[in-house]
Amino acid sequence: MATVRASKKSCTVNPLKMSQPIGGALAVMGLRGAMPLLHGSQGCTSFGLVLFTRHFKESIPLQTTAMSEVATVLGGYENVEEAILNIARRTNPEVIGICSTGVTETKGDDLDGFIKLFRERHPEYARLALVTVSTPDFKGAFEDGWAKTVTRAVEALVEPWRGERHPRCVNVLPGAHLSPGDLDELRTIFEDFGLMPTILPDISGSLDGHIPDDFTPTTIGGTSVGDVARMGEAAITIAIGNQMRAAAEALQAKTGVPYRLFERVCGLGAVDELIGFLAEHTGREVPAKYRRQRGQLVDAMLDAHFHTGGVRLAIGAEPDLLLDLSSMLSEIGAEITAAVTTTPSPSLAKVPTEEVVIGDLEDLETMAAERACDLLVTHSHGRQMAARLDIPFYRAGIPMFDRIGAGHVTHLGYRGTRDTIFRIANLMIAEHERHEPTPDTWRSAGENAGRAHH
């Protein structure tokens, strides 16, 4: 079991984490016809807009209440009201998700009170779904903002259920560490067992890079408000990652739907657990395609361990992604030598290493240098660190802005785990080839000098 400690530095030097409002905004984007609204200054929203646009390479719907210094001091109701009215009139959304930021949380704006007052003043928008979330960016991290927003969406949008359960319906609550490609793979797995999943939030429908027939200023896919309202019809809820426990508990409290939490979905044993549960739940045989994929994964692990065994790994990621990837890499022989994360979580104690530090990329670089790490795993802001350490770099998490296809990278399931192993093993092969002897390096220094003279 890993011990967890927080960095004691006076300031963050090279940030690893992103803020809660950004995580909350991404969760809202998993709803159909949605518009995330950050209650704060324009700069807060501009930062998130640039970050998501660079990562997904897509048009991102994101609005702001544009709080000025005066509005912040006097209170932000007028700004919230004006923003909701403008969005409703110009974009006709199904739902607006309103996330607070540091400046409005410090002032103490009561978002729930604002919405109650808005409802009283504007009964013509009674059918417009409004979800408010407290996401101060001076505490917590990206994963926390996502988890809080999903929990609030459950509390605000799911209707109490009094009818019969549908045995084929299943709710899926994915963590922020899963990409659109991961969610597509997850949906396929559930459907292959004859289940009808409702995924909340479903960024695979809104941020998977498809081009719609007509332009829409809101999200172009995701789970509809109506589908969220009917989540009480399901027989069971599947939560992916410790961050989703609170949302699963809120859904159970409101509808009575029991839940099952899977802390990991990457790695042989983790996927076996998920597939075995689905077979037991549905009473179906495991489809032949997954038996074949499992065999391919086992073979990939055998092939890769020659290149990954004994590799000293430095990894920086949000807690659930950290647990997922580090555990999988440990299973193929890598040593988790340096691990840094962003926020406290029950997942951290289970990371297969002696110590996990809640800190920044400077902490990770210092640990990686001191412990002579061979491979770096983190998001794109680690690229300069990898160059300074002169070690291979595997990009994982958000943001991944210096490569394309980030939204389609898949880590979960037998197939996603297999492909992740191949990508990392190939990095180590390329690194080995970079240092392999060549005919030029075999020659003595004198011979090389002579050849240079002639």
Image (cartoon, rainbow, N blue to C red):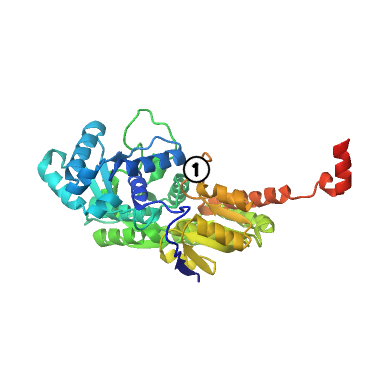
Position of residue 144 measured from the top left corner of the image (x, y, whole percent): 36, 56
In-image side of 266 versus 63 (left or right): right
Position of residue 111 measured from the top left corner of the image (x, y, whole percent): 21, 50
Relative to 226, is 140 above or below? Answer: below
Query: Is residue 204 something that shows in the picture?
Result: yes
* Placement of the C terminus among the 4 image quadrants: top right
Position of residue 365 measured from the top left corner of the image (x, y, whole percent): 55, 57
In-image side of 380 versus 448 (left or right): left
In-image side of 48 versus 252 (left or right): right
Q: How many marks?
A: 1
Q: Which residue appears at 37% of the width and 37% of the height? A: 60
Report helix, strand or loop for mark 1: helix
Furthest-top residue in this view: 214
Position of residue 214 measured from the top left corner of the image (x, y, whole percent): 35, 28
**Circle 1 Cα neighbour tier, 10 Å, few/some/many (<14 / 14–19 / ≥20):** many
In-image side of 89 versus 194 (left or right): left
Residue closest to the eye, 214 or 72: 72
Relative to 362, is 118 above or below? Answer: above
Q: Which residue appears at 55% of the width and 53% of the height? A: 377
Q: Which residue appears at 22% of the width and 35% of the height? A: 86
The residue singled out by tag 1 in the image is: 406
Query: Is residue 288 something that shows in the picture?
Result: no
Q: Amino acid at mark 1?
A: Ala
Residue closest to the eye, 167 or 187: 187
